[in-house]
Image: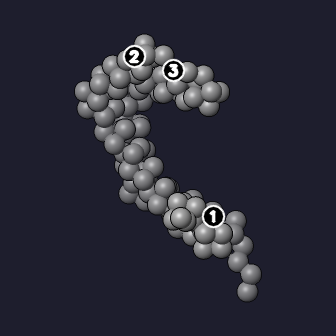
Amino acid sequence: MAINLYDSAYDLEKAIRNSSEYSNLKKMYDEVNNDESARRMFENFRNIQMQLQEKQMMGQEITQEEVEQAQKTVALVQQHEMVSKLMEAEQRMSMVIAEMNQIIMKPLEELYGNPDNQQ
């Protein structure tokens, strides 16, 4: 019996949407978006994060000033309870997805070997 991988992927999507991790992330995201100061702070943080990632991907050097600005923004964001909770929920969801990715990639690692484990 052939397995349709796309059907399995859609089942996984539904499982993610029904997970407690996703429900908590959505709740925190909605709370932040419904609070003007939290939303602005979170958007500012995200913009800085994306700008630095873009520079890295383009091979551009990140200046010390940009690093310091990012560190100040992170410190400020961590002090805001709502935004901090959202970031924690994002991290938990990211960990779940990373773990699922490891499971999904297991057949290919077995086939080709895991480069991290080779000597």
Q: Report whether residue 79 is seen.
A: yes
Counting from the top left corner in percent of width and height, residue 43 is at 46, 24
Residue at image position (41%, 43%) is 90
Residue denoted by label 2 = 69
Counting from the top left corner in percent of width and height, residue 73 is at 36, 21
Answer with left or right where residue 19 lies relative to residue 110.
Answer: left
Picture quadrant of residue 118: bottom right
**Disc 3 to disc 2: CB gap under 8 Å:** no
Give the quadrant of the N terminus: bottom right
Quick one: which residue is furthest to the bottom in this view? Answer: 1
Residue denoted by label 3 = 62
Q: CA distance from mark 1 to mark 2?
A: 39 Å
Mark 3 residue element: loop
Q: Earlier in the sequence, mark 3 or mark 2?
A: 3
Residue at image position (60%, 22%) is 60
Q: Earlier in the sequence, mark 1 or mark 3?
A: 1
Is disc 2 surrounded by few (<14), some (14 to 19) or many (20+) residues within 10 Å?
A: few
- Between 20 and 116, the one nearer to me in the picture: 116
Residue denoted by label 1 = 9
Mark 2 residue element: helix
Quick one: which residue is furthest to the front in this view? Answer: 119
Nearest to the eye among marks 1 and 2: give it: 2
- Between 58 and 23, the one nearer to me in the picture: 58
Task: Identify the disc placed on residue 91.
Answer: none
